Amino acid sequence: MSHEVSEGVDISRRSFLGKSAAVAGAITIAPGIILHQVANAKPDDEAVTGSVRWGMLIDTNKCEDGCTDCVDACNTVHGLTGHGRPQTDTQYIRKVTLREISTGHELSLPMMCQHCEHPPCVDVCPTGASFKRKDGIVLVDKHICIGCRYCMMACPYKARSFVHEELKNQTLNAPRGKGTVESCTMCVHRVDNGDIPACVEACNKGKHDAMIFGDLNDPNSHISKALKKHGSQEIRADLNLNTGVRYQSI
Amino acid sequence: MRNRLIQFTLLLAVLALLPAARAIAGTPSPTIHEPHGEGVKCVQPEEEIKRNHMNYILHQRDETMHEGIRTKTYSLAECINCHVFPDKNGHIAGIESEDHFCHGCHEYAAVQIDCFECHADRPQKYIKRAAKQATIEQDLREVLVARGAESGVMK
């Protein structure tokens, strides 16, 4: 790819990256191993814009029951450790098993912050701590979170957790502390550097390929093409939240 | 009795003069840990950063959080990367220790900081080590508790 540049083709860095991103959409390293790359990292000093909207597509047919690769990767990256109290321990992503009563058909899916276009958590936040970035990622600014937990009540997906106890040895990229609410950040620190979220990476590494991450605004992105071809469902679509996380086969 | 009185007066005089002597010697200042490595300089002149570091960090904080601007110049993580490192014995001072770069001055100035209730107080490579140590200690504690319970049953 570097050849294109050295040959003096007059294209801006951006459009070059755009083109290479399209090429690098799915690189096959070896048979069976596919790396989905999002090769359009923005420069560090540039603010995020609304021209992209990050989203995720999860194919529940490929999501194995009992597999926790995504959850484990998330816990590692964010340094999430529990106190053995599943009711209150922090979870950014959790596996949910659904069973249809009439047929007995079971399916397993990862549930996390759905990064809604119209997030109820942002509506109810009294301090502005719960907010949506221009690129569609919904976050908690823990600097101004007062820990009132209104957002936890408002979220239809039970995606948020509250930190009840003092923490130590937090990781560099995931500052977390007592008295604040937190949830899936769509690995914002990785996305800003042009990487994909840890859960998606782990799912691909485990050769499940149940999760696709990408830009919903770009019609040529892997995720947009998959959405166009296969369609998708929102969980609680009746709420008209226009979620950024979509599911197939539910 | 008279001697006693003289001794006591002298003692008082010495005690009264002590602060003055200290003032002559200069006000004690906190130890400042120079950045790691030779020729490494702070992103701003020392006087500027001493007075205004909080403004730089606060500004960067909001930009990073809300706009995804991740330049390293005024990032808290980079302060830590440069100024927090193990001593000669390989021991690294946590934020609760007087030897921590931030703690020294903040204790001295009586300004409480809560950055490190959430943020890492040491570079990433040393966090892993500390986390591992904590896990080992936790495991050991659990084993000891379990053994205690066992021996309790045996009695």
Image (spheres, coloured by chain):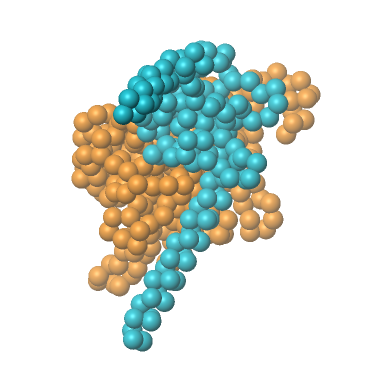
Question: Does residue A113 appear in this view?
Answer: no
Where is residue A207, by image quadrant? bottom right
Q: How many marks?
A: 0
Q: Is residue B40 left or right of residue A101?
A: right
Question: Does residue A95 appear in this view?
Answer: yes
Vertical position of residue A179 compared to residue A63: above or below: above
In the rendered view of the protein, which quadrant contains the N terminus of chain B?
A: top left
Q: Is residue B46 left or right of residue A68?
A: right
As drawn, the residue found furthest toward the bottom would be B154
Colour in which the image shows chain B? cyan
Q: Nearer the viewer, residue A82 or A39?
A: A82
Where is residue A126, by image quadrant? top left
Q: Nearer the viewer, residue A55 or B119?
A: B119
Q: Nearer the viewer, residue B76 or A133?
A: B76
In the rendered view of the protein, which quadrant contains the C terminus of chain B?
A: bottom left
- Which residue lies at the image location 25% right of the left edge and 39% below the top edge? A147
Q: Is residue A143 left or right of residue B90?
A: left
Percent across and percent down for residue B137 are 48, 61
Q: Among the chains, which one is orange?
A: A
- Which residue lies at the image location 61% right of the left edge and 40% below the top edge? B87
Percent across and percent down for residue B74 are 52, 23
Q: Nearer the viewer, residue B4 or A68?
A: B4
Percent across and percent down for residue A118 are 28, 35
- Which residue lies at the image location 57% right of the left edge and 13% below the top edge? B45
Percent across and percent down for residue A198 are 51, 48
- Which residue lies at the image location 61% right of the left edge and 27% below the top edge? B35
Vertical position of residue A131 compared to residue A177: above or below: above
Where is residue B19, by image quadrant? top left
